[in-house]
Amino acid sequence: MLVGEEGDVTMSDVGELQAARREVGHKGAAREIRRNGRVPGIVYGGGKEAIPISIEEAVLSYERRRGGFFSRLYSLDVGGKTYSVLAREVQVDPVTEALIHIDFLRLTADSTVNVDVSVVFRNEEESPGLKRGGVLNIVRRTVELVCRADAIPTLIEADIGELDIGDSVKISAVSLPEGVHPAITDRDFTIATVA
């Protein structure tokens, strides 16, 4: 299993999920799985054959509501065999919002992934621009990062304590963990401004 250093708060927590292997069949088989309170899905990647699975709908819904679902590493148990995975896509019914299907990306020890990580703004109360009546204009609430699967940051922090009206904080001012870099490499993009 891929896990960051013990107690390291910058790495995402590893969640645990239980799944059952399912038989691939006609469309009616997927409906039957959903009627039984489960969500059909697939585990793919890692240079191995795809595995059709089903997961309990209540557990999957809870994990999605927790936040950071697509950047959280999961240990997925499928019939006694464990895989390190990242959720990649969830299909939702547009009317009922019921979960229809989920895709998981299987990871290996050397997997590199692109993930959207939330930005948290620190020291707002110290910003001279905000004290004078300025407004924080958030350009990016998440930043797409490229990192190893076992080193996904839970969040990144942008310090705005010294920003005055007209100033901005760019990605180069944000301290990223070792081995983590933004997916956009051709420019120093803005994360927030004080207007």
Image (tube, rainbow, N blue to C red):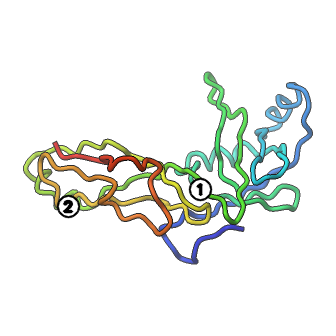
Is disc 1 placed on a helix, strand or loop? loop
Q: Quadrant of residue 174?
A: bottom left
Is disc 2 placed on a helix, strand or loop? loop
User: In the depicted view, which residue is nearer to us: 62 or 144?
Assistant: 144
Residue wearing tag 1: 72
Residue 128 on image: x %, y % = 11, 56
Residue 119 on image: x %, y % = 39, 53
Residue 14 on image: x %, y % = 63, 63
Callout 2 environment at 10 Å: few (<14), some (14 to 19), or many (20+)?
A: some
Q: CA distance from mark 1 to mark 2?
A: 29 Å
User: In the depicted view, which residue is nearer to us: 142 or 54?
Assistant: 142
The N terminus is located in which quarter?
Answer: bottom right
Look at label 1 and name its amino acid: Arg
Left or right placement of residue 125 versus residue 84 in this view: left
Left or right placement of residue 97 versus residue 124 in this view: right
- The residue sitting at 36% across, 55% down in the picture is 120
- The residue sitting at 78% across, 55% down in the picture is 18
Left or right placement of residue 182 versus residue 150 in this view: left
Numbered tag placed on residue 86 in the rendering: none
Left or right placement of residue 174 versus residue 151 in this view: left
Residue wearing tag 2: 161
Asked if residue 8 is positioned above or below residue 152 in the image, the reply reads below
Asked whether the residues under the numbered discs 1 and 2 touch, taking CB atoms below 8 Å apart as contact, a structural biologist would say no
Look at label 2 and name its amino acid: Gly
